[in-house]
Image (spheres, grey):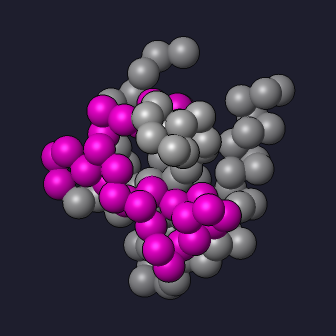
Amino acid sequence: MMEVLNPVIGRAAFSKAGRDKGKLFIVVGIVDEDFVLIADGDLRPAERPKKKRLKHLRFVDQTADAIVEKINSGSRVVSADLRQVIREVKELLEG
């Protein structure tokens, strides 16, 4: 799979380093050119996203349109939304 380097809100990414290595997250915010905010609704709830270096993430082609729409409309993203999106992305990647 091609590595996608452009971090956009709603994009799914696997952690490549740290205690959360191998877990799938959704980008919920962009801090600067080196860092993004990620959450999975489980270990990292939407209310407490993790600040993560881009080089420690492996982005996948899937983007969560529902999350993007919520953030753009000013609605709060809740952990249940993130868990649902992560389930869907995992199904797409496996199937």
Whether residue 10 is visible to the viewer of this picture, yes or no, is no
Residue at the bottom extreme of this rendering: 75
Whole-percent x and y of residue 43?
62, 62
Q: Which quadrant would residue 65 be assigned to in this image?
A: bottom right
Whole-percent x and y of residue 41?
63, 66
Q: Is residue 53 magenta?
A: yes
Whole-percent x and y of residue 29?
35, 62
Vertical arrangement, residue 34 with respect to residue 50, above or below: above
Vertical arrangement, residue 85 with respect to residue 62, above or below: below
Residue at the top extreme of this rendering: 1
Query: Which of the image's four quarters has the N terminus?
Result: top right
Residue at the front extreme of this rendering: 19
Q: Which residues are magenta?
A: 32-61
Depth check: give the residue in front, 51 or 95: 51
Q: Which quadrant would residue 31 be assigned to in this image?
A: bottom left
The residue shown at (76%, 50%) is: 87
Whole-percent x and y of residue 80?
71, 72
Whether residue 89 is visible to the viewer of this picture, yes or no, is yes
Q: Is residue 57 magenta?
A: yes
Query: Which of the image's four quarters has the C terminus?
Result: top right
The residue shown at (34%, 58%) is: 51
Depth check: give the residue in front, 61 or 54: 54
The residue shown at (68%, 56%) is: 85
Residue at the left extreme of this rendering: 33
Vertical arrangement, residue 29 with respect to residue 78, above or below: above
* 77 displayed left or right of 92: left
